[in-house]
Amino acid sequence: MAKLVRTRHPEVTWWCPQLSASPAQAMTLLLEGTAAWPRGQMAVMGSSLGGFYAAWLSAQRGVPAVLVNPAVYPSRDLARYIGEHPVWQDPSQSIFFEPAHVQELKVLESHPSPTRPATLALIAKGDEVLDWREMLARHQAGHVRLIEGSDHALSDFDDYLPQILEFLQLL
């Protein structure tokens, strides 16, 4: 996605920061980093836990969001992952997920959404990590692309680029 935006839409600011394992620190970074951004020209996008974060930030900022297999109850789902884990993008690095991070996720889950901005949720029935029915129930008020098969990583992501770009008005 980053390459596509850079290539086809160099006028678009693409920001994909490395987020802290701490949800509170991650949200602080995102809120501060987007504080001066023009809301009418901003959108957010995320996958899995990043999809949960994107939905939260979208509601806080009142901007559209593309959500790819978004986590719905990350405090519940990540509670069993307390401890040290390799960083997905670079297994030579690691993060430590603490019990306090589960509590931080609970706080984010409990914040009411100040707005219901436009969302496009790409939800794969074949997601082996998250329950597609929970994702659908949470995001059915927006645009939903319910995908037969696929997987948590949405390995066939490129197939959905036209719909994503149309939703983001980047065609």
Image (cartoon, helix red, strand yellow):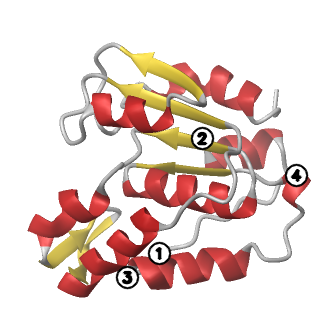
Marks 1/4: CA–CA distance? 23 Å
* Disc 1 secondary structure class: loop
Q: Return the residue at label 4.
A: 41
Marks 2/1: CA–CA distance? 18 Å
Residue type highlighted by circle 4: Gln
* Disc 3 secondary structure class: loop
Marks 1/3: CA–CA distance? 8 Å
Query: Residue drawn 26% across and 65% down?
Result: 75
Evaluate if marks 2 and 4 touch, with contact meaning CB atoms under 8 Å apart: no
Residue type highlighted by circle 1: Leu
Q: Is residue 31 visible?
A: yes
Q: Where does the C terminus fall, quadrant-wise?
A: top right
Residue type highlighted by circle 2: Val
Evaluate if marks 1 and 3 touch, with contact meaning CB atoms under 8 Å apart: no
Q: Return the residue at label 2.
A: 66
In percent of width and height, residue 31 lies at 66, 76
**Mark 2 or mark 4: whose residue is earlier in sequence:** 4
Q: Return the residue at label 1.
A: 19
Marks 3/2: CA–CA distance? 22 Å
Residue type highlighted by circle 3: Ser
Using residue 112 as the reference point, say whether residue 71 is left or right of it.
left
Q: Residues within 10 Å of mark 3 (few under 14, many from 20)?
A: some
User: Above or below — where is 83 with respect to 116?
Assistant: below
**Mark 2 or mark 1: whose residue is earlier in sequence:** 1
Query: Residue 22's mark?
Result: 3
**Mark 1 or mark 4: whose residue is earlier in sequence:** 1
